Amino acid sequence: MAAVRRFLGIHAIPSHSDLALLLSWGHLVLAVGVRHAGALAALGAAPETAQRSAPAEYRSVVAVRAGGPEVLEVARRRLSEPRRGEARVRVEACGVSAVDVQMRQGLSTYPPRFPFTPGYTAVGVVDAVGEGVTAVAPGDRVVVLTETGGYAEYVFVRRHPMMRIPAGLDAVEVVAVALNYLVAHQALSRAARIRRGQVVLVTGAAGGIGTAIVQLGQLLGLRMYGAADAAKHSWLTDHGVVPVGSRGADIVDAVRRLEPQGLDAVLDGVGGEWVDHALAVLRSGGVLVEYANPGSPGRTLRLLLRAVRHNLAGRGARIRSYSTGLWRLDRRPLLAAWATLYELLEAGRIRPVIAGRFPLPEAARAHTLLEGGDVIGALVLIASPAEAAEG
């Protein structure tokens, strides 16, 4: 299958330079190198109005201030027509991610201005387009990397990455792939340049991104070790991953005993002290891929500087990163990864682990569960009443 062949050939993708590393972490590229090609690029004429009537108002979930899940409230907004260069998407489902939780807490490289609507990804149907939009037309089913604003019944897309998807795919699975599998794919391919049969450690291995890495790792024939709480070890074992605990020092001891030659890669979505633990178990020439949110501009900068100093010193293992914010420099790798991943999804080669589906107004409940740390897989909010919701 073409998608599998492309994915199994990912080791040929060039690695980041130190400059790319500096630009990638924490969306430090917000004002640099914006490329509009790909999201709303011309693909043929499209009508400017939807065929179905739209409501006067729509619901969205708003974080009214920084704090716990209780700060999430449902608001009603007037539904406006899309402006020039803008597509209006009627949302079917939106993903619930750790970055949404962190932004709600005010912990981000670029903390949001409150009040704001969280939601990093959404899937839905274009129901209206503004003047000049020719890439999509009303009736097109699309996935969108919203970054914020996804927890809503409608989103407006101007320049964020958006791609048509097959109508038959499950909206919940689509939105889980949109972020979790995107990060997993790019961490493996673009950052780690992983090769078939290599040995890796995945932190947070039973989370949304962790389970995605595990499934893609299976396609690559990787030997995988997983760091996760004991309650999740049975899931890891069932999926061919060797559990090595959850405490950093214990994991270092276990991995050194099991893999005395060291690991080829550590894929880390936890951050913090994990940087030191990861470097301790990597072989010479191995790579630590960081995709965790450091939590503040200061922490991001310190981590970036440490990575650059470490890599320049040539101390054996390397530190690289992946951030979805790289689309602002070049959106083509993101769109190519999506195309491959949705082909794999449609073929049944990947199947997102869904921990729960919740109606849009229950966003606070979903955040509470995610913060509790007991979730295996992804949580999704259902914005369309046509989708069945389950806790």
Image: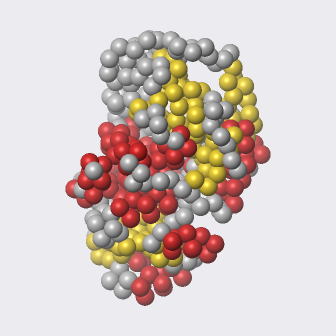
Please identify the residue farthest to the bottom as the structure is shown.
Answer: 257
The one of 16 and 178 positioned closer to us in this rendering: 178
Please identify the residue farthest to the right as the structure is shown.
Answer: 70
In the rendered image, residue 124, in percent from the top left (x then y), is placed at 53, 31
Residue at 66% over, 32% down = 385
Vertical order, 204 against 167 (above or below):
below
| Colouring of the image | secondary structure
Vertical order, 226 against 213 (above or below):
below
In the rendered image, residue 28, in percent from the top left (x then y), is placed at 44, 44
In the rendered image, residue 197, in percent from the top left (x then y), is placed at 30, 70
Residue at 45% over, 25% down = 140
Quadrant in the picture for residue 264: bottom left
Residue at 43% over, 19% down = 137
Quadrant in the picture for residue 15: bottom left
Question: Can residue 152 be seen from the camera position used here?
Answer: no
In the rendered image, residue 45, in percent from the top left (x then y), is placed at 35, 14
